Image: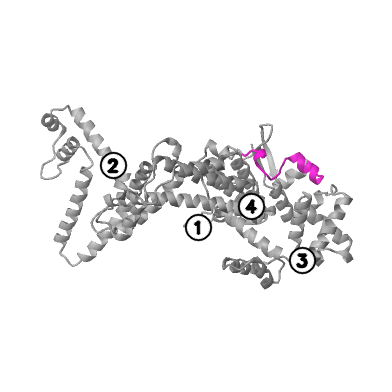
């Protein structure tokens, strides 16, 4: 098996193995995009490589530079190994997956040429093919991007003679009509004809370019307008976000409607691919009537518009803006299960559809479907969060300390609650309130000390002019209160042993011998109780 030339890329590969599957798919696509851009003769900062793949930018810059030649080799290994862990079956993909033999036939080259392309940056993934075996394969869109970005290097090794004379006539006729009548640019012409003839856009583009070189007086691409540049793209997107329709945008930019449409579609695809979505799978989602079943589950367990009975009781000491939270009814167990099934169902549909999306052929209706699943998942998540906001308030009130603001705790708890919704597995059988309560307690254990330190700082400011002796006394009171709070988590026997052995309160410290006599227990049993109490205190502090 080939070895990595760069230890940093080998380490990065091991780290990616622990990311969620959907995030790993996004990182894999980012690594492929980076590999296609690498110049073997240049050097690249490690920080830049990590950011391009993971989106993470370290606080301290790493000055390490990676040579382009070694980086090409190692990124190819990274892509192959990370894709192997995704267990993707070729039968689940809409986009064709080509093997080495397919490439040699399609482009009339030898297998050595394909291996040479791989060394120059052609990304190869590992797939599970129809025979059940894992092999290296190449996504058609990736092959086309490689040939487009390395056209000069690979043109000598390729031969597109598989385009028949009849096909060539059709290609040239359609291209001329699109260039003259529709004012499509080169990329759009190749895209449209490729979709119609079930051909690669690169094949279409090469065929037209070859014709133009041989027949300059009848050149087709010369008639086509130039593509949309970055400045035009930015202006179009800015106006579109303000609500201007495509027709008006096209008139303002003096561009055909198709060009503006493609700019908007490409932007939506980029935004969709940047979303990190995790879901918890269920057998229901793979059934042909899953959409109907999920809808029926939701309809069967509707809730009343407002809470009744005990659920409607609002604590009197809450401010009015928090009392409004109690007007949302609590979820029954059946309703809660239905909501989580619906939430993960739409996430599942989004991830599956995104994996099958072919960016070069994508249309608005496909993106509408993708965004629709994402919007429905967000709506469902918001419904779950709203129904559990009063739980955040309840747990936050138990963690209140002198000088702290309840709204700061609630705000911090809301973030924890939203994260808990994404990670909760309804199949394990317990209620979300149990899971989220533990998550909130752990979250508050981290945030409360920080908030308390702010409160203590404010106390310090107020007491800055007070003599040191009184300041020390104030701090002792705060420490005593904190010790009493922690001891309150222990049983009566545990508090007695801890208090006597460590001399808490007004008593002197007592050894194990005297403790065993006082309590009528063996020294070994006293030590066991003490150790259990200490572990309980540690869990309370660090939970």
* Tag in front: 4 or 3: 4
Tell me where residue 195 appears, x and y as whole percent. 75, 52
Place residue 213 in its image quadrant.
Answer: bottom right
Task: Determine which residue is flagged by label 3.
Answer: 183
Q: Are marks 2 and 1 in contact (CB under 8 Å)?
A: no
- The disc, 4 or 1, on the residue closer to the chain's N-terminal end is 1
Task: Determine which residue is flagged by label 4.
Answer: 366
SS under mark 4: helix
Task: Determine which residue is flagged by label 2.
Answer: 538
Q: Name the mark on residue 61.
A: 1
SS under mark 3: loop
Place residue 536 in its image quadrant.
Answer: top left
* Tag in front: 3 or 1: 3
Give the Cα separation between the discs numbered 3 and 2: 71 Å
Q: Which segment did they paint magenta?
A: 88-110
* Tag in front: 2 or 4: 4
């Amino acid at each position: 098996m080939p070895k990595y030339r760069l230890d940093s890329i080998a380490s990065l590969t091991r780290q990616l193995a622990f990311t969620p599957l959907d995030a790993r798919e996004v990182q894999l696509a980012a690594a492929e995009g980076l590999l296609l851009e690498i110049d073997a003769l240049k050097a690249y900062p490690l920080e830049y490589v990590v950011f391009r793949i993971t989106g993470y930018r370290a606080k301290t810059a790493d000055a390490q530079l990676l040579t382009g030649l070694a980086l090409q080799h190692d990124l190819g290994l990274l892509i192959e190994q990370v894709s192997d862990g995704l267990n993707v079956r070729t039968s689940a993909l809409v986009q064709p997956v080509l093997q080495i033999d397919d490439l040699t036939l399609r482009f009339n080259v030898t297998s050595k040429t394909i291996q040479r392309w791989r060394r120059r940056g052609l990304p190869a993934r590992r797939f599970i093919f129809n025979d059940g075996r894992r092999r290296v394969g190449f996504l058609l869109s990736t092959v086309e991007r490689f040939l487009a970005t390395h056209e000069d290097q690979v043109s000598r090794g390729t031969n597109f003679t598989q385009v028949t004379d009849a096909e060539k006539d059709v290609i040239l006729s359609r291209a001329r009509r699109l260039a003259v009548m529709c004012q499509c640019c080169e990329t759009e012409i190749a895209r449209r004809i490729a979709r119609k003839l079930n051909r690669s856009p690169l094949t279409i583009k090469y065929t037209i370019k070859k014709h133009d070189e041989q027949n300059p007086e009848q050149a087709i691409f010369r008639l086509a307008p130039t593509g949309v540049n970055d400045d035009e793209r930015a202006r179009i997107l800015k106006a579109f976000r303000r609500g201007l329709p495509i027709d008006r945008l096209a008139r303002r930019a003096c561009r055909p409607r198709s060009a503006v449409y493609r700019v908007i579609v490409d932007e939506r695809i980029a935004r969709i691919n940047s979303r990190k979505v995790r879901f918890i799978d269920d057998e229901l989602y793979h059934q042909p009537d899953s959409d109907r079943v999920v809808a029926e589950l939701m309809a069967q367990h509707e809730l009343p518009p407002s809470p009744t009975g005990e659920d409607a009781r609002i604590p009197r000491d809450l401010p009015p803006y928090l009392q409004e939270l109690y007007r949302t009814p609590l979820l029954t167990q059946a309703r809660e299960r239905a909501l989580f099934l619906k939430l993960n169902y739409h996430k599942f549909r989004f991830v599956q559809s995104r994996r099958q999306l072919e960016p070069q052929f994508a249309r608005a209706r496909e993106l509408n479907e993708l965004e629709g699943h994402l919007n429905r998942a967000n709506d469902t998540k918001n419904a779950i969060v709203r129904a559990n906001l009063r739980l955040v308030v309840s747990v936050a009130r138990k963690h209140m300390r002198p000088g702290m603001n309840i709204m700061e705790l609630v705000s911090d708890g809301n973030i924890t609650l939203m994260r808990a919704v994404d990670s909760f597995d309804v199949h394990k059988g317990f209620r979300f309130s149990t899971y989220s309560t533990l998550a909130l307690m752990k979250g508050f254990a981290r945030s409360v000390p920080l908030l308390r330190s702010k409160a203590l700082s404010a106390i310090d400011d107020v007491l800055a002019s007070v003599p040191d002796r009184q300041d020390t006394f104030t701090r002792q009171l705060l420490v005593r209160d904190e010790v009493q709070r922690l001891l309150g988590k222990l049983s009566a026997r545990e508090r007695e042993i801890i208090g006597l052995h460590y001399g808490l309160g007004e008593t002197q410290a007592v050894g194990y011998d005297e403790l065993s006599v006082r309590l009528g227990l063996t020294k070994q049993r006293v030590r066991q109780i003490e150790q259990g109490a200490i572990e309980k205190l540690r869990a309370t502090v660090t939970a």
